[in-house]
Image (cartoon, rainbow, N blue to C red):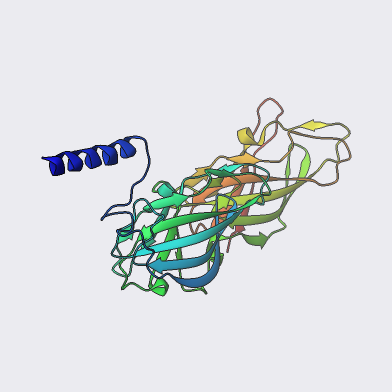
Amino acid sequence: MMLILLVLVVAAGYFGLGLLGIHVPGPGGSGGSGVQTPITTTALHESIPYAGVTITVLNAQQSQTFIDDPNTTTSGMVRLNLQEQNPTTVRVSWLYSEIARLILPDKKMVAPTFVKAKVGIAPGSTQTSIVDFAVPTGDKIGQLTLQLGAASEAQMDLPLTGHADASKYGPKNVKLGGQMLYFGLNWTLVSATVQWSIAGQQASRGMEYVIVTLAVGNTLSQEAITGSPFSYIRLQSGTVTASPVDTTLPVSFAMGDTGKSGTVTFLLPQSSSACTLILLPQSQSGAKQAALDFQLS
């Protein structure tokens, strides 16, 4: 009888600690005996841009279990030690539980078991994070691929080989130089930049950002008020005509401005090539439509 009472008391205490949120190691998902199994560390230093932030996989650690991961398995774990750098002027937020997946050699995709990270990163800041995955011990680090991007976003794959090339996700700049007359102003298409993310935002699934840089000169004898670029600038590629998602182009141009510049950002399908920049007619001012063709590649 005393033995039965002792078992009940111990069980009640164990259950009570669980209700208080205190993790108690057991025979399952917290490392079993509480002894950390040997850890192998593979240096990687591979970087990839996400939502304007540079995410670097510093290294990958592999072990049978991680006793400080409350959801660890005992059949194999991989821990990615990450560094995030935010060169933008905005705070960027994301959840690795939503955007990070590990692709195994058999093409199975696994979600993180544990994340130790801040939800966001301040402008100009650098920080580190930990993301754990359940991976069979027989799978080698060099056979794994980190995928970043939620289901609704443009997803990027980074093979954990130590020499992966993620340049296709970064900015690609095309120098241009075409000119047109609109609203009595001289417009020069300076360049176009293609990338998968902008400050604080990853492109939508199957899409990429095209950032057009324009320089505008005013030889009129008065200020020219063109209005918001959101209302009159469009970018066409194939059957898609896109409105701006962001712009730094002024709404007016003073007399004597010789080349005030700004950018207009659009979302287009990935691998768009032939484009047409369209400046729509404005009935109130009498401005007629202008258009300029250019190539992204």
- Give the side of residue 90 with respect to residue 65, left or right: right
Q: Position of residue 130 (x, y in %)?
A: 48, 55
Task: Give the answer, above or below, for where 259 lies relative to 43.
Answer: above
Q: Position of residue 66 (x, y in %)?
A: 38, 60
What number of labels is visible? Answer: 0
Residue drawn at x 62%, y 50% as measured from the top left: 211
Q: Position of residue 243 (x, y in %)?
A: 56, 40
From the image, which quarter does the N terminus lie in? top left
From the image, which quarter does the C terminus lie in? bottom right
- Residue 235 appears in the picture as rendered: no
Residue extending farthest left: 1
Task: Give the answer, above or below, for where 112 lies relative to 217.
Answer: below
Q: Position of residue 291 (x, y in %)?
A: 63, 46
Viewer-proximal residue, 153 or 56? 56
Asked which quadrant contains residue 167, the reply is: bottom right
- Give the side of residue 257 with respect to residue 121, left or right: right
Viewer-proximal residue, 252 or 180? 252
Task: Give the answer, above or below, for where 29 lies relative to 122.
Answer: below
- Give the side of residue 226 with respect to residue 13, left or right: right
- Residue 172 appears in the picture as rendered: yes
Viewer-proximal residue, 45 or 87? 45
Asked which quadrant contains residue 289, the reply is: top right
